[in-house]
Image: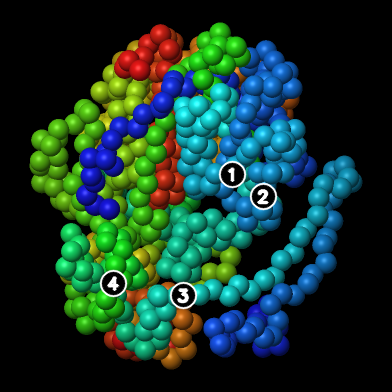
Amino acid sequence: MIKFSDRQLKIPKLMRPVYLATVGMSKFDRAFPETRTEELCIQAFTAAADFVNMTPSELKQYIHTCYYGHFADHFGDQLLGESVIHDRLGLDPLGNIGVKTGGATGGSTMWEAVKAVASGYSDCTLALGWERMDEVPTDEGNHLISAAADKDWETPLGHIYTGYYAVMAQRYWKIFGKEEDSFRDTMAEIAVKNRGYARMNPHAQAPMKITIEDVKNSPIVAYPLRALDCCLMSVGSACGIVCDEKTAYEITNNPLRIYIAAGSHTLRVADRRNMAIPLLPNETPDTYKDLAKRFPGSDRYPGFTGFLAARMAAYYAYGMAGIKDPIEDLDVIELHDAFTISDIQSYEDVGLRPYGEGRDYIESGDAYLINPQTKKPGKLPSNLSGGLIGCMHAVGATGLMQIAEIGYHIWNRWDEIHEPQEKWDAFGRKKPDDWTSLQVKGAKRGLAISHAGVGSHVTAAILMDPKNLLKED
Amino acid sequence: MPKTENEKGFVDVVNGKYKPKGVFHIPEANQPIFNKDTGKLAGITNPRDMTYMHSYGGEAPFFEGLGKGKLMATRCDNDKCDTKGSIYQPFRIYCPDCLRKNTIIDMTDLAKTTAKIYSYIITHRSGAFNSLPKPIKFINIEFEGVVTILMSVLAVGEPEFDKKVVPIFNTKAPTYTITDLRFVVEGTSESELPEDFTF
């Protein structure tokens, strides 16, 4: 569709408030040759139980329905993998279902879990995701990932998903980035920032202390994208448990309110038709009246420079939660930084900056925990987990990891998860000598964006301290 | 190692049913995976060699057309549709708005005269089973009057925004896949085309 009816633009309504009671995640890595998937899932679930001072069997007593996010069955050569994990978690005979929406699988899994509670079907649901991408050689893995594109029209073209994605990066690079060296530096800065934040995260797969020059000198994957501009391929698991108000307060003294919405767009970028830009609450038609003049070539929306699915997910979620201006109303954010350039694209899709001006979110220092220019707290720190570039992209778990990380900040318990020496030791990782807390002080509200491939599915999950809501129920 | 003719699977449709013949999978034994440091068993390989039978359904005219040097598209001709007249390339069997069956049209001449590059990327990487020469020059092509932006590859020339390109077709040894369609920059001569391709 390129025109939407009022019914389609209706702000989604949860029939009762939904709360995030606890979260957990496993160690993330490129490969686990001696660990079964269920071991990682149990690690994540046990972490969620620990977080609310329960045993796993105590926590299980609350769960009524289970949602499992696992994207790529063909990687593991196991259909009904959800059923395997459900059994190994000892949750039979509860109802369960698998969710698959590419890179957005984790977010979509939570979307389903929240709706089950909101509707009254369940008082407590489990959203648990994982991915296993280490059990085939890399070139076969590239083929399997490319099977998420259209198998007749795209996959035979190189069997390499990066190629289908990077054409969008190229368009953004030339139209909005104007091929400027300074823009190239801004892209690199994102890789430096996110990998740097990953250094403080024992769960993270690829912490690195690098420079802009390191990124710009890394091998070219598909110009202008270089190896250090790209996200990781990972294995691991993450989960969250959502409840109605009564159940949530039985599990913990301080559950968080959760709102979540989803959007979609064509699987093939080829099928994107021109349309008017859907506006967010902090935009007006005037915002874009001279866009094509300022950025010649940007007259087509979303063209290849925006993600309609992300814009729609933000539109719905902001309406649900009462967000008028995400920079002002939110305190911390996790974005789907599949590539440095797509990270910039999402700043615009979710309204952190207007279309064409996403780079300013980084260049202003707003995206940092501590603004490098002012040395004061950044307005809206992003991807303090390390993101997909520095922490992980275990597809079915990614969106849930992001939600967990936002939760830790609002609960003011980020240090408890990321600091203990015992965890660094247990994961076989060296805690950096300059380890620093990335806790966002006083965080009350946060957003996690979970995004599939070229933008076929996107979810926007908003967490809030219940005492700091923006909208009455 | 390419398969011999005796190791391949072939399929016909007879009386509305698939009739496979030949070899569709070659069994291969599992192999243990040991940890070289500890000497302990870590896992097992699971070799797979399978051939799928896939229907092109209503898109078959597009893929058959490529081997005949034709670029087929579709157009919505429904008077009651808000987007009547929209031409789709990629070929869509049904209009995405009214869901009425589109009309199949031949847009070969339109492509030869109006195709230009909307975006592109060059990559030296590929996945398993790739059949394209590397580097692969992905291009996205705009055609006058077409509402979508086709993805293909540039076989001859260097990609640039708005550069005019023309389609070429694997008419001599068609594979009946999307790789039978490629593009070259305007002005390319017949002698520069890849083997088996013609304008």
Mark 2: secondary structure: loop
Identify the amino acid type marked 2. Leu
Report, in whole angstroms, how far the alpha carbon at label 1 lies from the one at label 2: 8 Å
Give the chain of mark 3: B
Q: Report if residue A457 is visible in the image.
A: yes
Query: What residue is disc 1 on?
Result: A98
State the residue position of label 4: B102
Q: Earlier in the sequence, mark 1 or mark 2?
A: 2
In the drawing, what numbered circle is on residue A80? 2
Image quadrant occupied by the C terminus of chain A: top left
Query: Which element is circle 3 on?
Result: loop
| Structure colour scheme | rainbow
The label shown at residue B56 is: 3
Please tell me whether residue B83 is drawn above or below residue A9 in the rendered image. below
Name which residue type carries label 4: Asn
Real-space Cα separation, disc 2 to disc 3, in angstroms: 27 Å
